[in-house]
Amino acid sequence: MRTLKHTVSAAALAAAIATVPLAADAQSVLRLDEVAVGELDPAKATDFADTMLMFNAYDTLLLPAQGTGGLVPHLASDYSVDGNDFTFTLRDDVTFESGNPLTADDVVYSYDRLIALGQGFSHLFRDHVASVEAVDDNTVRFTLNAPYAPFLAALTRLQIVDSQTAMANELEGDYGERGDYAQAYLSANSAGTGAYTVTDHNPQELTLLARNDDYFIDIPEGAPDEVRLVYGLEGATVRTLMSRGEHDISSQWLAPEIIRALADRDDMHLFTESGTGGFYIKMNTQRAPLDDVHCRRALAHALDYDSVIALIQITDEVAQGVPANGPLPAGMLGANPDLPVPTRDMAAAQAELAQCAYDPGDQTIEISWIAEVPLEERFALLMQANFQELGFDTEVVRVPWALFTERVTQVDTTPHIGQVYVRATTPDPDALIYNMYHSDVAGTWQSTEWLNDPEVDALLEAGRSTIDQDERAQIYRDLGARLVELQPTIYAFDTQSVYVARGAVEAETLMGDGSNSYSLDGANFMFRHMDVQ
Amino acid sequence: MSSTFFKTIGIRLWTSALVLVGVSILIFCIARVIPGDPARIALGPNATQEQVELLRERLHLNESLPVQYFEFVRELFQGDLGMSLYTNRPVTTDIGDFLPATLELVVFAGILMVVVGIPLGVLAARYRDKLTDNVVRLLSLLGVVTPTFVWAVFLMLIFAFYLEILPVAGRLSQGVDPPPGVTGFYTIDALLAGQWSTFGDAFSHIILPATALALTGIGQTARLTRASVAETYDKPYVEMAQAYGFSDRRIASKYALRPAMIPSLTIMGLDFAAMLGGAFLVEAVFAWPGLARYGVETILHKDLNGIVGTVLVISAFFLIVNMLVDIAVAWLNPRIRLQKRWAG
Amino acid sequence: MVAILRSEAWYKFRRNKLSMVGLGLVTLIVLLAVFAPLVAPYPTHAGAFVDFVNASQPPSATNWFGTDLIGRDILSRIFFGYQVSLVLSVVVLVIAVPIGVGLGLVAGYFGGWIDYLIMRVTDVFLSIPPLVLAMAIMGFLEPTLLNAMMAVAVMWWPWYARLAYNLSRSESHEGYVLAAEVIGAPKWHVLVREVLPNCLPAVFTKITLDVGFVILIASSLSFLGLGVQPPTPDLGSMVAEGAQYLPDMWWMTVFPAFAILIAVLGFNLLGDGLRDALDQGR
């Protein structure tokens, strides 16, 4: 017992020492968290945390326009299109963190590196770009194989790396003259032109970024001097840190109940990000009874959409999504406003069921939910209750993500019902739905429907090869109507990411009516748009 | 004595190496049996089939298991555990980053376990069936029966959320620079460098996670110590010592505790060693950048090299601790020691 | 003879109030588990049941322990959770203890190459973190309750082997064993009749502790999606899932945690009492 007492008083002593104010710190700091890991290599970055890092430490030739959709020049001062040739003129006032000026060679190096490593977002380019060449120091030309409309939007994912710094840090490796293509270096250091530079990076723990006052755009006074991006905090930990005022912005992965509890406090407010994706309840269209469109429609009519929305409601005004009416979220190019928002209609469900070739009593429907997303269990149980009213026998199965991605590679092991959040990887509808519905790419976590419909394939291909944006919009509207008719998917809601922020932190891109928001998930976390004063 | 003693240690070392080989084979096979194509998971859903094939080739995944294992051992002897598919860094770098943090946590928890657990157990045995005994038993039971992560969450809520006297997360406060790395233990490094405020900060950060991790072990240790000591109190030689009128304290330490420590020590050694693998939930709650968390993430991401590397390190730690325990057991039990001498 | 011994042990057992408390708790829990469908206020809540209107309600007159995120009565789920936990623990220990104790005793008593072989295999299993081992085993099995039990049993036996090994090694040099050997009793006979009974108290102590640990480990497996499948209630999963909603929805964590605590407490007190009673009765 005496020992215990000693421990306690030692603890108190240590606490006393720890609370002695440390050296006065005039630096303003922004503290936020994301799930592990943070990938810093521009040729490998894909996840949300990676995206945050990319849009702060690096820049791209084009950026999504704020508020309106569309694209605006960024590192490029101007660009011209001539058939399949895209020529970009680079700004002449941009320097990397090393002090090297930005040149066309950097763009070529960055592109070559992305393709050579073959990871990250290389799939956005590899089958479509024939060549990339430096015309002169300030001009770079991309030549495509064929017309490919999503190309410009894809450029928002091509971060430009400082080629001189990278080449100076290439180690021995598999890429011939290029050694390891500076993989070791760039996974631990930034070498970009960004508004922030990475000062320390541990992919499972923490990334520290410092403001780059030489940035080619003026950074407002209120933007943080330093950013601490922490990885892998538990919900309860974030909640405690935020209540103590030791954390500024939560991740979007907190449970609605926790966000609600935090939002109830006067010193907190909510950030939102929307319009880039949806929550999709995907039905395996090649397994009985869901290979019959009438059975699929019966299920879609039976779902209690109001309850789904109630489950994601956080406050009276804010929810983690809004009712969807089709595959593309409202506001995205080609979203079809004419489609009705589905509602629960048991009479319609029974009518469809009557036309279905299968007897519901003979069928067991496997409803899966992703173990890492506890909210999906509630959706699964709701579906179970709803579908049982139609007479279907159901089985709710929890599947860890890694197992899910494995199971969906075969038709027979793909669950009848899968629940997936999908977001567009570039500000273009193609980046959201091509990988979901084209028959060539069936059998990934995005395409567990195994849809094989020639009309859908044709529309998806037309959407890629048609350059005129108005024509494209019409193509995607038609596609939306066709998909709602085929009902491979129940369109439950358009997702909205919700973050809790300390009241003193403001971000124009994440607040208000979205008129300052970028139409690309994660790009709104450009720290230069934030105000921590 | 000394030559046989060292011979014993030599044999133990050899055996441990043998077990480590066994572990490496077992975990190597297991890592490749967990469902999911590691190359596909590492590259993400948008990678093309060719890229996946390329990575499979590079990881030797298309070879037979024995060939893969041979490749692994060959690279291991060059000090290379491969690249982590999860963090995209060399596994050795990851382990070098995360291991000291976990070791520091586990060592602190181990110290708590022994320093608090054993005295509690002896106390309970000495006053068996009295109030003290019952109080200690109930307290240690509480420690044992409550899941570690519940302890972690409750401790955090009490001391960090409501009382706000201890920090919530990480190893150091924001703005405090890590002390110059010698051992990788921030507390010890800070002391070595004479940085008192850094020491205080590091120490205040480790209290809650170490306590959460240790509570199960404390309870377990107290219970085992009580059970063994109580049993030896009934042994003739202790009764005889009592009859001779030796002091309570002397009986407790010399006659009752020492032989009673043998089974307890074995289990404590196992418990202590198991902490390294079991620290996961504590590390998650307190955002402790350690190896256990890394290990579980590597499994979930089917990061072959990461799994094998982490498990090998944890197993090596386990074997070393075990070896020390065995030596301690041999030293504590005169009869076994004697037998060893004859055998040698 | 047996009756006298038994009654003497029973007397010793009864003398300790805590042991009786343990017996009472275990009896209560077993009864609750067996008669869960009869005593639970809402038996249907153990299965697929959804009531989002009444979700996340704090304790009240209708739901004494509150409701969970899906609107199910937590008290009812705790009773059914006991069912699952008890079955799981018993099966795991019935598999793991005989294997572990048997191998450990043989290794410790006979020594030599048998010792070496058995204990090295034990070491290999012991030195892999338990959760990793169990996850790996579950990796190539379907996630069902039965397979979860197999996986836990596989990671459990080495602990008993290790314990029994150390006990038998130290016991085999005790006077009574040497005496039995000197008078020419067969080795197997000595092992089963002399060494084994003397190891049992420690094994009993560990078993009583382990009922709780089996519940905990099984629940970590469930939490990773590899063990008990929802909606089947599992106390460990309830705690793990509720923990992220602390402190606001404390009832989701506190009551199931308390239920685990009560169960393990009961088994511990009971086991301790048995140990003391049998020990002195010998």
Image: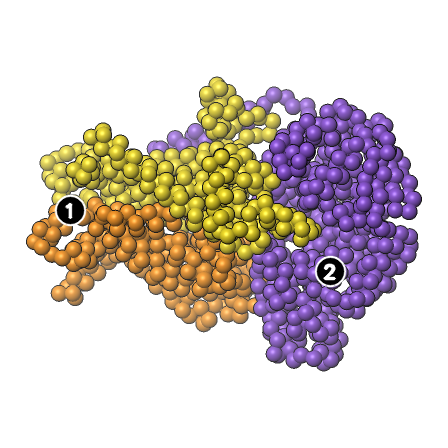
A233 vs A215, left or right, is left
For label 1, the residue is C174
Chain A on-screen colour:
purple
Residue B33 coordinates in the image, percent (x, y): 50, 54
Residues at circles 1 and 2 in contact by the CB criterion of under 8 Å = no
Comparing labels 1 and 2, the label whose residue is closer to the camera = 2
Q: Give the residue type at disc 2.
A: Asp
Compare residues A511 and B96 and report the one nearer the observer. Answer: B96
- Is C261 above or below relative to A483? above
Colour orange belongs to chain: C
Residue visible at 39% across and 46% down in the picture: B22
Dot 2: chain letter: A
**Residue at point 75%, 23% (across, down):** A99
- Helix, strand, or loop for circle 2? helix
Q: Nearer the viewer, residue A1 or B79?
A: B79
Q: Which residue is mark 2?
A: A440
Nearer to us in this view, C190 or C214: C190
Point 16% across, 45% down: residue: C173
**Among the 4 quarters of the image, the one containing residue A281:** bottom right
